[in-house]
Image: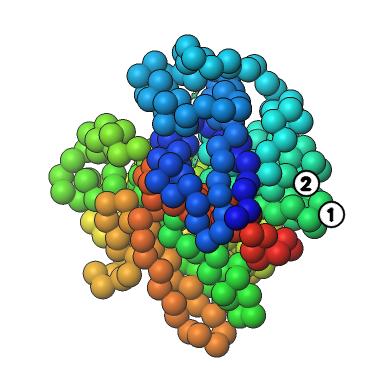
Amino acid sequence: MKEVKVSIFGFGTVGRALVEIVSENPEVVGVKIKVESITDRSGTVWGDFDPLEVKEVKENAGRISALGDYEVYSFKPKELIEEVKPDILVDVSSWDGAFSMYEVALKERVSVVTSNKPPIAEHYDKLRELAEESKAGVYFESTVMAGTPIIGLLRENLLGENIEEILAVLNASTTFILTRMESGKSFEEAFEEAKSLGVLEEDPSKDIDGIDAFYKAKILHWVAYGEPPEKTERVGIREVEDAKNVRLVARVSKGEISVKPRKLEENSPLLVSGVYNAAIIRTNNLGELVLKGKGGGGRVTASGVFTDIVKAALKFPSPR
Ligand code: NDP
Ligand code: HSE
């Protein structure tokens, strides 16, 4: 049995769901997962502790530093890597600047698993380079479509295909809001309802203005073509008046990404509702592939993170 020490950075909806999944499956395919530390903005708990107890305290008191029974450390991200020395850093935070922490981790040969989009969208080339040098890996399945495995599909299964185009609905919050507007709610009412879903970004304007979907489209572009797009377009849903059959659609093709509201055909696979995402991937040999699944929520996102932890432990696939 291979044991891996995991540092969980961020302890919101996804981090807490991840702790539940790890507690239910501490050993999987020959890998034993030990949660070595958990961090939120108030501090880090490190060493021998019960992750479910930390989760309970976080849910009741709102901060890890309220733990009475364990010491809580005030590490800077760099100190966290250097002191705790995990095998895998799991970033499930909403920190846009987390790239600087990944740099430290990879230089220390610590693999990175993340559901946090901006560091991958903005710095994928640099991260890939660092991963190659250190032989550690960077895994980011849940950044796009949460645990629904579009990254694995593109990065592993379709490696030999030419990706001609991806059309996708990648943001669950805007789908929810648009479908509520379709059934007669105002934008403001629908937005208020969306708050209870657990899928809005910490700063919800990232959902509404298409920024979240844009990061995701950019990540898909990196994975499909190995380079950033040259031409980009981003329009959010604030100006949508008639929401009937409208979804926030991302289009990715070589050199170009666009995110904007589009009116879809009645029978379009992209006409999803609730927290579902969908993607149509067109390739040279396969024609059209359709992938549909939940694109947000604690367990759904933590599922992709959990599988990535197992992949990182097994170095599967090998870093590239
Ligand atoms: P939450 O807002 O629920 O939690 C974010 C966590 O990050 C909080 O615990 C927060 O600490 C912590 N955090 C933020 N900045 C820092 C920092 N500088 N230092 C330490 N901790 C920090 O977000 P979610 O759990 O919903 O999402 C986590 C990540 O996963 C986000 O990047 C999100 O975009 C992504 N994601 C989320 C999905 C979802 O459905 N929820 C789906 C796919 C990806 P504190 O609690 O102290 O404020
Ligand atoms: N805020 C995101 C969404 C969470 O609504 O899709 C999943 O990435």
Residue 72 in the figure: left or right of residue 274: right
Residue 71 pos. (x, y %):
58, 15
- Looking at the rendered structure, the secondary structure element under dot 1 is helix
In the picture shown, does residue 176 fall above or below 29?
Answer: above
Mark 1 C-beta to ligand 1 under 8 Å: no
Q: Nearer the viewer, mark 2 or mark 1?
A: 2
- Does mark 2 have its CB less than 8 Å from ligand 1? no
Mark 2 and mark 1 residues within 8 Å of each other at the beta carbon: no
The residue at 30%/39% (across/down) is 197
Q: Label 1 sits on what residue type?
A: Glu
Q: CA distance from mark 2 to mark 1?
A: 9 Å
- x, y (%) of residue 192? 27, 32
Residue 248 in view (yes/no): no
Assign the N terminus to one quadrant of the image: bottom right
Between discs 2 and 1, the one toward the N terminus: 2
Residue 81, above or below 259:
above
In the rendered view, would you say 170 is above or below 99?
A: below
Which residue is pictured at 48% across the width and 62% down the height? 149
Question: Judging from the image, what secondary structure is the residue with disc 2 in?
Answer: loop
Provide residue 259's location: percent of width, then percent of height. 48, 55
Q: Is residue 305 above or below residue 103?
A: below
Residue 133 has which mark?
1
As drawn, is 223 to the left or to the right of 16?
Answer: right
Farthest residue, direction front: 1
